[in-house]
Structures are given as C-alpha cells and as structure tokens.
Amino acid sequence: MDALIKILEKFDKKRNELVSQGKWNEDAVAECFEPCARGILCNGYFLVNGEYIIDLGAIELYYHEEEEGGIKDYIMYHTNAHSSKSKVYKLNNNSFPYFKFGSFNLHQSGIDVTFENEEKKYRASFLIRSYRVLKTEDGLYPENDDTKYDTHSTHIFDDMFYSGYGNTEIVWIPTDKKNRKLELDDPIERTNVAYYEKPDIKDNKIYGSNDIITENDYNLDNKKYIKIKDKFYKRDMRKWQFKLKGIEEEK
C-alpha cells in the first residue's frame, strides 16, 4: 500500500501550504484532495488476492477537525463528535484513537481508506462510492473491459473480502489507465449526505439540522434537499465527491 500512501500524503503537504497562506476553508479541503483523487481514480487499482481488481469509479472525501473552531464534518463516523458505546472510546477519555495512515475503516455505509493526522487533530478518509470488479490475469488491468460501475457502496464488502477478512491480501497497484480523466467541469456533492450546523447527539446518532424540511421543499428543489427513508434533509453542498469522467454506472 506504499504507493497509495504516497498519494494520500499529498493532502497534508498541500494543506500545510494553504493554512500558512491563510487560505484554509472547505473549498481548500477539496483543492487539497483533488490531486489525491486524480491519482487514485486515474492511476491505480486494488488487487485482491492476485485474482480480482477493484476498480474505483467515484470516491467521497470526509474531513473533520477535532479542535474547536475547525472545519466540521458531523456526518463522518470516526470523530469525537459522536458518542460511543465503545469501551476503547471511554478508556481513551471519550475519544477515538487515530487510525494508522492508510487503514481500511469498515462501517455501515461501506469502506473508507483513512489518512488521519493525530498531531494536527484532523480526521480524513475517502469512501469508495462506486466501483467495479474485473477478473485479472497476472494482476494486469484489462483496458477494454466495459463492465459497469456499481453505485451501492455497501456491496464492496462481499467483493473486496470474499475470502474472509483475515484471508484477504489487498495491494494497491499503480498504473496508467489510458484516457482517464476526472469529472471536474461539474463538481459533485457527496451522495445522500445531510448538512448539520451543530450535532444533536442522541442514542449514538447525529440527527438532522435545525431546519425543518418538508416534502414540498424537496419537490421544489431536490438538488438542495435529500430524502433518506421517509425524512427530508438539507443537503450538504460541499463538493467533496470525485468521479471519473464518462463512466457507465449500474444503479
């Protein structure tokens, strides 16, 4: 995974530069991650047990600063803004230990690859939002395969860990995928992410923002609002999803 870690290290390097220039904001977060997204989506893939390629089509950035006054991403799971029944959380002074850089975080929405920084007190990860599985020979990427990308992020558990968590070897393979480009002309908001001004923590869950969103609001402008199950929420409009241009997705 060393090659993937080198890609993700670009985020902190660019972050240091923008923070020192006083240009740090939510748009700058996306600016820092864009080179990482380009390297991940356009120039590599996961190879599972030497047999299958997990080819990524779209990834979503999650970023949360733990210190007061920092940029917040309350929808993110692995932050101290969430209460937790975890014994480790309580023994660690009601704080989640920071993940090792480049770790997988398996959770109810899918799989994240993490790149947190304990020294600077921020959590960062990308969720694999869409992907496809390709059969490989000798670990090589099949350039002309027309398999569509699966947009159900939770399907990846069975595909990435089909042989069981402890029996799976996953490596990152750098490669030059010909003619791959990011969909940057029209930046993308994350999928089904609600906006929270302040967390209202109950029963280990973060509920919606203070705004009361109705079905009529949603029907008038479903780009600004989202529907999750039977409830309506103000949409988080941060453009933190990165996607390959021109790919075909299987809904």
Image (tube, rainbow, N blue to C red):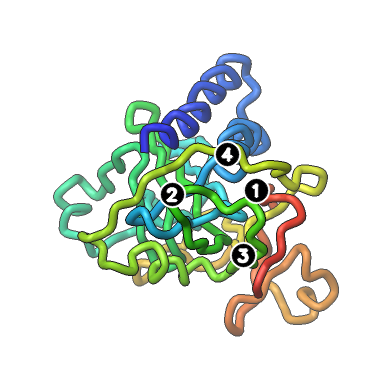
Mark 2, residue position: 139
Crowding at dot 1, Cα within 10 Å, few <14 / some 14-19 / many 20+, comes out as many
Question: Considering only order in the chain, which callout, 4 or 2, is on the residue closer to the N terminus?
Answer: 4
At 22% from the left and 53% from the top, the residue drawn is: 89
Q: Which residue is mark 4?
A: 43
Place residue 118 in its image quadrant: top left
Classify 227 as above or below 107: below
Q: Amino acid at mark 4?
A: Asn
Q: Earlier in the sequence, mark 2 or mark 3?
A: 2
Q: Earlier in the sequence, mark 1 or mark 2?
A: 2
Q: Is residue 135 above or below residue 174?
A: below
10 Å crowding of disc 4: few (<14), some (14-19), many (20+): some
Name the kind of residue labelled 3 in the image: Tyr
Task: Pick the quarter of the image with the N terminus.
Answer: top left
Q: Which mark is residue 242?
A: 1
Residue sitting nearer the eye, 99 or 162: 162
